[in-house]
Image (tube, rainbow, N blue to C red):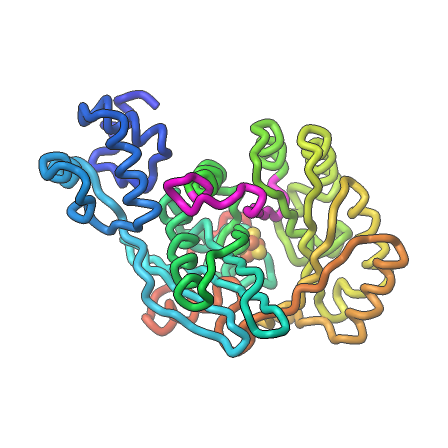
Amino acid sequence: MSENALTDKIPADLKTLTLDELTQYCTDVLGLQRFRADQIFQWIYQKQAATFGEMTNLPAGVRTMLAETAVLHRLTPVNEQRSKDGTIKVLFELHDNHRVEAVLIPEFFDDGVADRLTVCISSQVGCMFGCSFCATGMMGYFRNLSIGEIAGQAIHMDSIARETFGKRINNIVYMGMGEPMHNYKAVMHSAAATCHKFGLGLSPKRITISTVGLTKQIRQMADENQPYRLAISLHAATDEKRNKIMPINESLDLKSLEDSVRYYYQKTEKDLTYEYLLFDEFNDTKEDAAQLARIAVWAPSKVNIIMYNNVAGVTLQRAREHRLNSFLAELSKRNVLATVRRSRGDDIDAGCGQLAIREGAERGKSISGKNPILE
Ligand code: SF4
């Protein structure tokens, strides 16, 4: 990044900068030594500092200079819901009063001790892709989240995990509000910040980035050999059905998705995951399972069958148990590796976007954002 690009940003929100950019900002713009950038990065990510005044290992003059030339946009938890099944959902307010949410999903051993702790985080305020089953899609698109706003959710949820379950989070999935690949740079750098020793020090293999099928970005992820796992939000296995529920499929159809998935595997040799929400009498027949099996062989993969959290105003409903069982039997007959993900947090607003939408409505805030795909 050129110095101009940085100085143009002043007062810069330091949470929009990568560590390299922050280092350049410190050395070239502020005239500090490089290690100051490491210290600031650690304060922002590991210690979640809200102000420069908290950065007590920086000289007072540096803190003043930072306060005069830069800002730290806040990420404030404003609501927390706890489900009977252990799921914890947090609503965060951003500096411009938009709200996004993150969910901590614990899985327990038989003796009730927490085993896997997965955090689902948001990458955008709203979303422009308008999937018909999705509460976030109903909001329309407002803006991308910054690196710090994304990583900050994971770090906050990790502190809740430690307080509540006495252990750190094991997994992060980018499956909350927004389409992660539509905010590619911030998403990849937020994952890097989270894996950094000054972040959570998490292994990149523990991070899964999902997409509805943005083929250019799937190829980019392969070309850059990004160390994170890839998940495709498939949800229907024919163009006809996918077009009905996911408008993106009309411009990027299953053939183009297949080409990008094959390219991804050829380049990275990494297997991937397909996410498949099972809707009653929509995509849950034996023929649907057969179509899904044809997709599952594009590259070594597994399928997560997700039991839908019904959303008010959406006609599609969670598939009934007997239909799930015959769907699974058909997949098994066709040697597809499939796991069922039961819906969690049924007693709280746990579906993606539900809490933000309800809170927005209660605050009298418009949820009619721009949606160029649907316009
Ligand atoms: S499912 Fe994902 S891509 Fe589709 S509208 Fe919801 S957030 Fe956007």
In reply to whether residue 207 is colored magenta, the answer given is yes
x 36%, y 69%: residue = 79
Quarter, ligand 1 = bottom right
Q: Position of residue 25 (x, y in %)?
A: 26, 28
Q: Where is residue 330 in the image (x, y as percent from the top left)?
A: 87, 61
Nearest the eye: 195 or 178? 195
Q: Where is residue 329 in the image (x, y as percent from the top left)?
A: 86, 64
Q: Position of residue 342 (x, y in %)?
A: 65, 68
Is residue 21 depicted above or below 154 in this figure? above
Please provide the residue range marked out in magenta: 194-214
Q: In which quarter of the image is residue 216?
A: top right
Nearest the eye: 152 or 373? 152
Which residue is outermost to the right? Answer: 333
Is residue 264 depicted above or below 164 in this figure? above
x 67%, y 71%: residue = 318
The quarter in which the N terminus is drawn is: top left
